[in-house]
């Protein structure tokens, strides 16, 4: 990571761990300055649920669904979707990672999509293309926004044990 990436990673972890200790603030931030992200997620999940493509479930304080196969996950505000049929370990890891993105949504609010959402989607496409072509790839979590999402999801899960 770069110095700027390291700084964003550290900031995100500190803020995310604070939010994990004060989940009421996670809700306040997501439902105020992160409201656009929450609305996008709610609309997407309503469409999935109404068209019977996915069953919406609860994962801690977020909503999630399993949709499709062989792709990964996507986070939209307080909602996320993960691929099905990928095995328990992969699904668990992806769910924790996407849950971590919900903390980033609360932290960055309207800046989530330009700082995290869009770059994350581009990184996913490049990473998947390189894997498909058999080209070398850096570790997926090597960039700050992916690494901090995974770390926040794992930290939250560890608190429950």
Image: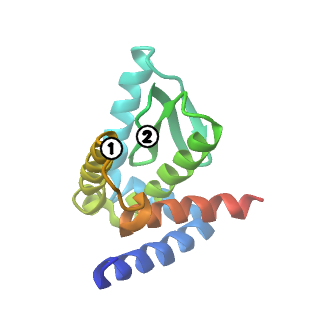
Residue at horizontal 44 percent and vertical 31 percent from the top: 70
Q: Nearer the viewer, mark 1 or mark 2?
A: 1
Residue 132 image position (x, y, % from top left): 32, 39
The colour style of the image is rainbow
Q: Is residue 110 left or right of residue 38?
A: left
The numbered mark at residue 72 is: 2
**1 and 2 marks in contact (CB < 8 Å):** yes
Task: Check disc 1: other Cα within 10 Å, few if <14, some if 14-19, many if 20+.
Answer: some
Return the residue found at the far top. Answer: 51
Q: Earlier in the sequence, mark 1 or mark 2?
A: 2
In depth, the one of 10 and 128 nearer the eye is: 128
Q: Quadrant of the C terminus?
A: bottom right
Report which residue position mark 1 lands on: 128
Task: Give residue 108's mark.
Answer: none
Q: Position of residue 19 (x, y in %)?
A: 54, 68
| Image position of 31 (left or right of 87) | left
- Residue 36 visible in the picture: no
Number of numbered labels in the structure image = 2
User: Up-down: is 80 above or below 155?
Assistant: above
Q: Position of residue 80 (x, y in %)?
A: 45, 41
Work out whether residue 122 or residue 99 is closer to the camera in this orientation and state it: 122
Q: Describe the element under mark 1 as helix, strand or loop.
A: helix
Q: Quadrant of residue 68?
A: top left
Measured Cα–Cα span from mark 1 to mark 2: 10 Å
Which residue is at a point 45% across and 54% down the rendered structure image?
102
**Image quarter in which the N terminus is found:** bottom left
90 over 7 or under it: above or below: above
* Quarter assignment of residue 29: bottom left
The single residue placed furthest to the right in the displayed view is: 161
Question: Which residue is found at the position 44% from the left and 21% from the top?
Answer: 49
Image position, residue 13 (x, y; %):
49, 74
């Amino acid at each position: 990571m770069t110095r700027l990436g390291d700084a964003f990673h550290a900031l995100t972890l500190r803020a995310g761990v604070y939010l994990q200790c004060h989940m009421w603030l996670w809700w306040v931030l997501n439902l105020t300055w992160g409201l656009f992200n929450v609305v996008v997620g709610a609309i997407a999940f309503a469409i999935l649920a109404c068209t019977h493509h996915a069953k919406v479930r609860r994962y801690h304080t977020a909503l999630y669904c399993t949709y499709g196969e062989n792709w990964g996950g996507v986070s939209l505000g307080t909602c996320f979707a993960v691929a099905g049929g990928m095995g328990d370990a992969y699904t668990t890891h992806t769910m924790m990672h996407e849950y971590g993105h919900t903390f980033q949504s609360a932290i960055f609010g309207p800046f989530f999509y330009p700082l995290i959402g869009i770059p994350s989607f581009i990184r996913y496409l490049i990473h998947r293309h390189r894997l498909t072509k058999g080209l070398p790839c850096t570790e997926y979590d090597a960039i700050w926004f992916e690494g901090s999402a995974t770390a926040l999801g794992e930290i939250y899960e560890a608190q429950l044990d």
